[in-house]
Image (cartoon, helix red, strand yellow):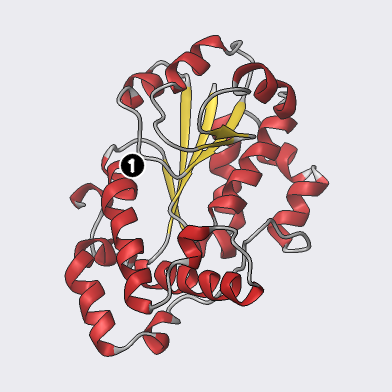
Amino acid sequence: MIILTYGQPKSASTYLAELARRACAIAGSNQNDLRASHLAGRPGVSGGFWAGGLNGLAKVAADLAPEDRLAIKTHSPPPRDLSELVAQGQLRILISYRHPGDAALSMFEAGEAIRAEGGDRQPAFASLTTHRAAIDAAVAHVRNTLLPWLRSGQGDAFPFDVLVNEPDKVLSQIAAAVGIGVDALMADRAIRNLVSGRKRVYNFNTGQSGRYRDAFSAEDIAYLTDQIGPFIDFCEDRLPREAL
């Protein structure tokens, strides 16, 4: 089985993916060995991150042994055979998402930090030199990638605030996906360190929700709302997932 974590950029997706990876290892699946056997050499795949089209997931899932649990992270749209893979028990999906205002502000600030360092890492963030550019990037990702995942009706979706503030809810869903008990997860020191904040994962900051309201101009907030108002309503619990 593949445990696939899809994350909207800046939605604690790396954190969720690391929890899933550790859970798969606790369930008895050596992630390095499985990656070497099933992912090495695949175009667009680096370590446990799969960029580009995901239509090759079906082949990977079919080649795994029944007891295998392979964690894969992606920012890509869902594959064509998503429902079939889920129905056959070959795929479980964990989704992270965030209010697009907060996501856009975090993307902009990541770009500022990269430019201040004088480095060229993460050029997609480094190119976001204005709030409006970050908003456009965040909106495009929601429209083109996140909404197809949410509209698929497949997978457990976690808002950013739940990921960072209510780890018990997240761990129960991860444990169910992997097929082990929550107690087994919490017995693992690495898991405990992650959910307690004693250990951070790369590029993850808990942040503070709603900061975009003070950082963005009234014009930019109105623009964001005009572009993607229904998704904002979903993030603020005014619209159910089924209505997206």
Q: Which residue is drawn at 61% across and 18% down?
A: 38
Image-based side of 184 in relation to 132, left or right? right
> Would you say residue 11 is visible in this rendering?
no
Among the 4 quarters of the image, the one containing residue 235: bottom left
Tell me if residue 209 comes above or below residue 51 in the rendering.
below
* Residue 173, percent from left and from top: 53, 41
The residue nearer to you, when weighing 225 against 197, is 225
What residue is drawn where x is 28% and y is 61%?
234
Q: Report the side of 198 relative to 125 (left or right).
A: right
> Foreground residue, 74 or 208?
74
**The disc labelled 1 sits on which kind of residue?**
Trp
Residue where numbered disc 1 is placed? 149
- Residue 210, horizontal then vertical, whole percent: 42, 79
Q: Tell me the quarter of the image containing the N terminus.
A: top right
Dot 1: few (<14), some (14–19), or many (≥20) neighbours within 10 Å?
many
Q: Is residue 202 left or right of residue 16?
A: right
**Front residue of 62 and 113:** 113
Residue 97, position as x, y percentages in the image: 42, 56
Considering every residue shown, the one lying at the far right of the view is 189
Q: Is residue 48 visible?
A: yes
Q: Which residue: 66% across, 16% down?
A: 37
The residue nearer to you, when weighing 7 against 162, is 7
Label tally: 1
* 91 left or right, relative to 228: right
Which quadrant of the view contains residue 232?
A: bottom left
* Rendering coords of residue 78 (x, y %): 35, 35
Relative to 72, does residue 214 appear above or below in the rendering?
Answer: below
| Residue under the image location 82 percent in, 47 percent down | 189
Which element carries disc 1, helix, strand or loop?
Answer: helix
Compared with 113, 59 (above or below) is above
